[in-house]
Amino acid sequence: MSKSVSDIYNDAVKQADADQFEEAIETLKPITELTPLLRAAHTQAGRCHWEMHRWREARESFETAVRIEPDNADAWWSLGLIALQEGDFETGWKGYERRWDSQAFKSPKLLTKLPRWCVGHNSFGEKYKSVLVWPEQGIGDQIIYSSLLRELQHHCEKVTVMIDIRLVELLKRATPWINFVRHDAKLKNSEFDSQIPIASIGSHFLKSSKDISELVATSYIKADPARIEQIKNELGIKPDDFVIGVSWASTAEKIGPHKSVKLEELVGLWDIPNAKIVSLQYGKPDYDIEPFETKTGKKIYQCMVNNFFDLEGVAATISNCNAVVSVSNANVHIAGAMGKPVYVLDANKLWYWNHKDNNTSLFYPSVKLFPREHMLAPWTNQIEAVIKELRRS
Amino acid sequence: MDTEDDVSYLDVKPEHRMPMPPQEKVWAQIGDDLNLSFIDWQMIESMAKQFDEAHREGKEKTQSQVMSKLLVLVRDVTIAETELRIKGG
């Protein structure tokens, strides 16, 4: 019969006490070989506590994981996210920077010889004059971190932002004094003296929750006026209509299903007086819309916009809405950055949504958050609360 | 000429998902060879359905709805005629 871990350990202690050091090391081998598995076990436990929104337990699990394997980037990154969520920004940004060492982080890196930008001076004691900001992660992340570009410009004469091609014009229209270029551009190093990934800008400016409301920009995405008019006609919007843009799913890898609701769960929105419900959903919305309309007899309006590729069209549609009701996805960020009232069914998986004043986001003052209790909880209470607020508005 | 050391760019590997939208019209595009290089039938069918609904409800149709309905009709007729031709040898 094989020995238990504690029996093996006790045998090794006896050997060590008897100065049989080599033998003790050999005896301990089956336990020391378990180290990567133990670290992985604590990381997984941390992840499960996180999903159940038990932040303290999650942090303890990740802390144990880094004690076992001090160089584990995944655990440090998770600790960073928890710290950011809890408002410990110093620890948070430090851990968040470890995302670049994690196998799980799937964002392309900038190939460059330029040094990393920082507040202050370069190694020659000169102030940085021209910084290249580069994109990472999804559309939502790129939008929320773009809220700090105006602040960055206060510290650097020239700011050039490489950004997802779908966002270039939307951002440029609202902030023409910043140079936005598409994400697949090749840029000459001679035009810059430094670079920074967009999500790292926060580490220089956001040192507390208070800094968020003081430093982030508002209304920094602007739709094309001609397109707004075109979509208004296409949807046949009348003055009495109360237009609500809805999206019910996130297609984010791994976490998407946790962030999504069933379209049927939103059926109460149709009872709001004069409500005209417009789909902002991207992906394959017809798979949900057709059965929903057949079953309920309720109508969802769609316009000639590919909600995934054509974010100009999405922004113009949102401009025509009185409010947006959405799960946490790219639409929330687009609408929030336009200053449009948004009601978010929040799965509470992203650190930045935890920074709020009552239920109003500190990053987007027009966004109200309705967080789910944990990943297995139903959405009923949040949906009821959203409908109640919309009826009041 | 610039060398790799003179430029900065994103190192996009196959595992990175960086969606690139069609540059001109999003729902349909004519390529350099003057052929149809992209068409979003999902969008067009959805607009054609809106045409049907507007028709049933006696409402006015938008240009996009009319154009989409025409495209779907022409497509369906073409498919039917092609099938007939194939069957007829």
Image: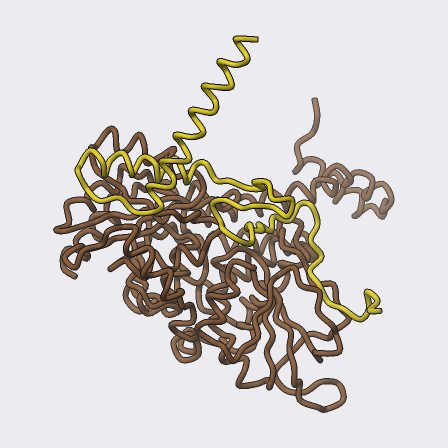
Q: Nearer the viewer, residue B40 or A24?
A: B40
Residue drawn 70% across and 57% down? A71
Residue A79 place in picture, x, y as percent: 55, 59
Q: Nearer the viewer, residue A242 or A234?
A: A234
Residue A259 place in picture, x, y as percent: 40, 46
Residue B66 place in picture, x, y as percent: 33, 41
| Chain identifier matching the yellow colour in the rendered picture | B
Q: Is residue A329 above or below residue A26?
A: below
Q: Is residue A45 left or right of residue A174?
A: right
Q: Could one spot residue B87 in this view of the protein?
A: yes
Q: Could one spot residue A10 in this view of the protein?
A: no
Residue A160 place in picture, x, y as percent: 60, 74
Quarter of the image with the C terminus of chain A is bottom left
- Which residue, as the protein is rendered here, is positioned at the far top? B88
Q: Is residue A67 above or below residue A115?
A: above
Q: Is residue A358 above or below residue A251?
A: below
Chain A colour in the picture: brown
Q: Is residue A9 left or right of residue A134?
A: right
Q: Nearer the viewer, residue A316 or A359?
A: A316
Q: Quadrant of residue A6?
A: top right
Q: Quadrant of residue A353?
A: bottom left
Q: Quadrant of residue A240?
A: bottom left
Question: According to the image, what is the colour scheme of the structure?
Answer: by chain
Residue drawn 65% across and 81% down? A130
Quarter of the image with the N terminus of chain A is top right
Q: Is residue A179 above or below residue A14?
A: below
Residue drawn 55% across and 13% down? B86
